[in-house]
Image (cartoon, rainbow, N blue to C red):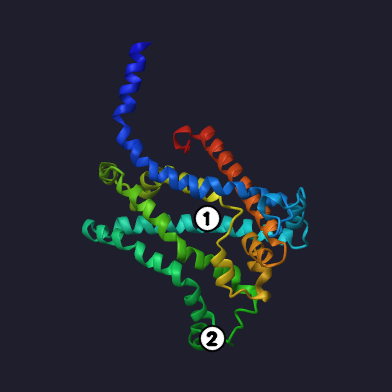
Amino acid sequence: MNEKKKKGAARIKQFIPLYFMLIPGFTYLFINNYIPMAGIVVAFKKYNVNDGLFFSPWNGLDNFQYLFGTQDAALIIRNTLLYNVVFIIVNNVVGIMLAIFISDVLNQRLKKLYQSSILLPFLISIVVVSYIVFALLSQENGMMNNTILPLFGKEPIKWYNDPTWWPLILVITNCWKGVGYGTLIYIAAIAGIDLSFYEAAELDGASKWQQITKITLPCLIPSIITLLIMNVGRIFASDFGLFYQVPQNSGSLFSVTQTIDTYVYRALTAAGGIGRSSAAGVFQSVVGFTLVMLSNWIVRKVSAENAIF
């Protein structure tokens, strides 16, 4: 027993420098992620400033009833779910295609340069995407109405008053803004595939498509599953900037742009909206956690080595 204790103490002592290195990260995580969880109580209270967070009167599940009892609840949940499902599918498919193209077409030197610089345009696009979309779609000065549509003999479209095209616009904008993250992960995964697999496939006469389907895609499955589980956890959340700023908060577009997050923001700006917005946040967190655990459990049942935990 003493031997085991000595070995355990020696092992702990060996990793003491690493434990010290973890302290800043754990401190940040505790302060920013765990301490604020005490605020969850406001989801079950009728918050008012005079009584404060912990002394405001309890109102049970009234805030949740407001969230799901509104006549727009079905529309909000439908938009949030369907957009996120489409975003997950499109971003992953486009990300895989771009990663395969970059890894296959560019030579090794150019690939390294490209991998180091590919983040820049996507990071920039996150900041300026709403402005660029407005520059394209502005009814008076936008490129679509003043340049592209006249080339095809089409009349100008009041983009911010007509919801017809906005599902497609939002999908394209989200893909443009976020596909770079997945692309980099897939490029890294492809770079880790043993080149001898491709050399052997070429010797056997495999076409490029067969190499992709029989070697590249199977080797990408762990990365695909990891990104899928991460995205499923946020399937009831939405990109506030995408659904609020890009459509310019136009009331005419609410039928296709109203999601849980934009609804929560509008509730937050109204009197008594703090409890309602907190209730929505609690709902999103609980559902997201449940979906992540369920997704990982399903993956573990099908292929245990590809599960995250």
Q: Mark 1: few, some, or many residues within 10 Å (few <14, many ≥20)?
A: few
Residue 90, horizontal then vertical, whole percent: 51, 59
Q: Seen in the image, is 299 located left or right of residue 256?
A: left
Residue 200, horizontal then vertical, whole percent: 27, 42
- Please tell me the numbered disc located at residue 89: 1
Q: Quick one: SS at disc 2? A: helix
Q: Quick one: SS at disc 1? A: helix
Q: Is residue 95 above or below residue 14?
A: below
Q: Mark 2: few, some, or many residues within 10 Å (few <14, many ≥20)?
A: many
Q: Quadrant of the N terminus?
A: top left
Asked if one can make out residue 238 in the rendered structure from this viewpoint, the answer is yes
Q: Which of these two is toward me, 201 or 76?
A: 76
> What whole-number distance in Å separates the C-alpha atoms at marks 1 and 2?
30 Å
Q: Quadrant of residue 120?
A: bottom left
Residue kind at label 2, given as amino acid type? Asn
- Please tell me the numbered disc located at residue 145: 2
Residue 284, horizontal then vertical, whole percent: 62, 51
Q: Seen in the image, is 266 located left or right of residue 93?
A: right
Q: Quadrant of residue 86?
A: bottom right
- Please tell me the numbered disc located at residue 255: none
Residue 128, horizontal then vertical, whole percent: 45, 72
